[in-house]
Image (spheres, rainbow, N blue to C red):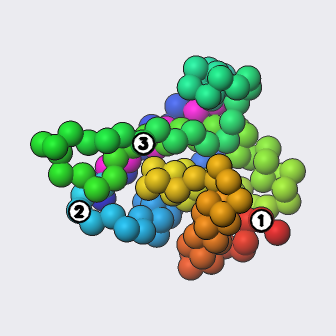
Amino acid sequence: MQLDIQRVSNSDAPTDDDFINWTQAALLHTKGHSAVLLRLVDEAESAELNKKYRHKPGPTNVLSFPYQPSDEMDLALWGDLVICAPLVATQARQQQKTEQAHWAHLLIHGLLHLQGYDHQDKASAEEMESLEIRILSRLGFNNPYL
């Protein structure tokens, strides 16, 4: 597994080792090599990407950009995740969670999106949330939806 981390926000964020550990825990059905770019951004870049790709105003906590590797690339999972670091801190305070727990949740949420999971309807949302809860529990974090 290859995890490239770009830290372009000045906000505090977990260590590379934390991100690697959480990423490994969230790779469910991937066989073979996986490559993910994790970019930690500020509100301005998050808002710009959110407007450009989701047509929604303002920053968002996590954006997932899955890629389909070409036939020449032997990758089981390939994509980019963008997490808005200041928003993680704000949401953690609002939701009365530790920042570490919220970071882990958002990273795992984004990685599940890269693996094809979504929350567009009730059944798929319940499946995705169940996976998030199970993965986070194995990592020692509480249910993020309580």
- Residue 66 image label: 3
x, y percentage for residue 81? Answer: 49, 42
* Quadrant containing the C terminus in the rendered view: bottom right
Rounded to the nearest whole Å, what is the CA distance between mark 2 and mark 1?
Answer: 32 Å
Q: Is residue 123 above or below residue 138?
A: above
Crowd band around label 2 with a 10 angstrom C-alpha radius: few (<14), some (14–19), many (20+): few
* Residue at x 42% of width, y 42% of height: 66
* Residues at discs 3 and 1 in contact (Cβ within 8 Å): no
Q: Which residues are magenta?
A: 35-43
Q: SS of the residue at dot 3?
A: strand
Q: Amino acid at mark 1?
A: Tyr
Rounded to the nearest whole Å, what is the CA distance between mark 3 and mark 1?
Answer: 25 Å
Q: Earlier in the sequence, mark 3 or mark 1?
A: 3
Residue under label 1, please give it: 145
- Residue 100 image label: none
- Residue 32 image label: 2
Q: Is residue 85 left or right of residue 89?
A: left
* Residue at x 74% of width, y 65% of height: 144
Q: Can residue 45 be seen in this snapshot?
A: no
Q: SS of the residue at dot 2?
A: loop
* Residue at x 84% of width, y 56% of height: 95
Q: Quadrant of residue 99?
A: bottom right
The question of residue 90 being in magenta is answered with: no
Closer-to-camera residue (45/126): 126
